[in-house]
Amino acid sequence: MKIQPVVIAYFTKSWVGPCFRSYYRYFSDPLLVINNNPQPHQRYWGLQCEEEREWLQKQNIIYVDSPARSEFAHPPNELSHGLAMDFAASWCKEHGFDVMLHIEPDCMVVGTRWYDDLLSKIEHYQVVGKRKADWHIGNLTHTTIDLAGSMWKINEVMSFVPRASPIIGIDWDTAQEAKFNAKSYLFDELTGFIHYGAGSYRVETPYHLVGL
């Protein structure tokens, strides 16, 4: 089973450096990094987008720009996180990978136990990761997945793009509908993997917490 680790970069220049360094302390497989920052002709573009792009292109990664003009982009010239994940999954399929390991930029790797745990389950499930929260809507309970540190069998899961759900009457977050419709296994904790949940625009990076 071939596994490709993936990072979606989006206004994350203060996070990607520590994230990458922590990952490469324990793993040698190159990260596939989708640069999903806006281009100069797109809305929200700023100098930080160019700075992150230039930095990424110098790293020991598989660098791919998001396809601003393609069947993935909707609205035109713009990719959501879910669409960027769809594009990453398509890239993985084209290059012969079976599983996409999704890592977010605001994550730190401080061991390998989390990876071994995910690997021990993915053969028997379509999606494995960490439990995030339970949604209780009427008689329905749905446990959401933390996308950071999650593995997906890319030939067996649907699109990561969120859409309105007729089942629970609310909009899904990115990839949650794909998880809902898949056979999944969720851990309560991922030992050796930290997800700060800081969001794309946070400036500070907790270098002191990981010694980077």
Image: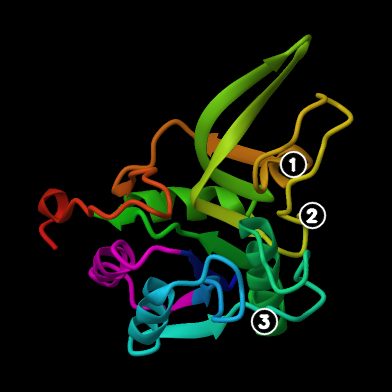
- Queried whether the magenta region covers residue 49, the answer comes back as no
Badges 1 and 2: C-beta atoms under 8 Å apart? yes
> Which residue is the site of mark 1?
177
x and y percent of residue 191 in the render? 32, 43
Q: Amino acid at mark 1?
A: Glu
x and y percent of residue 184 in the render? 66, 41
**SS of the residue under disc 3:** loop
Mark linked to residue 96: 3
Which circle, 1 or 3, is nearer the viewer?
1
Task: Give the CA distance from mark 1 to mark 2.
Answer: 8 Å
Which circle, 3 or 2, is nearer the viewer?
2
> Which residue is the site of mark 2?
158
Badges 3 and 2: C-beta atoms under 8 Å apart? no
- Quadrant (top left, top right, bottom left, bottom right) of the N terminus: bottom right
Give the residue displayed 64% in from the left and 66% down from the top: 84
Give the residue displayed 44% in from the left and 57% down from the top: 104
Instruction: Give whichever of discs 3 and 2 has the lower sequence position.
Output: 3
Q: Quadrant of residue 72?
A: bottom right
x and y percent of residue 78 in the render? 68, 68
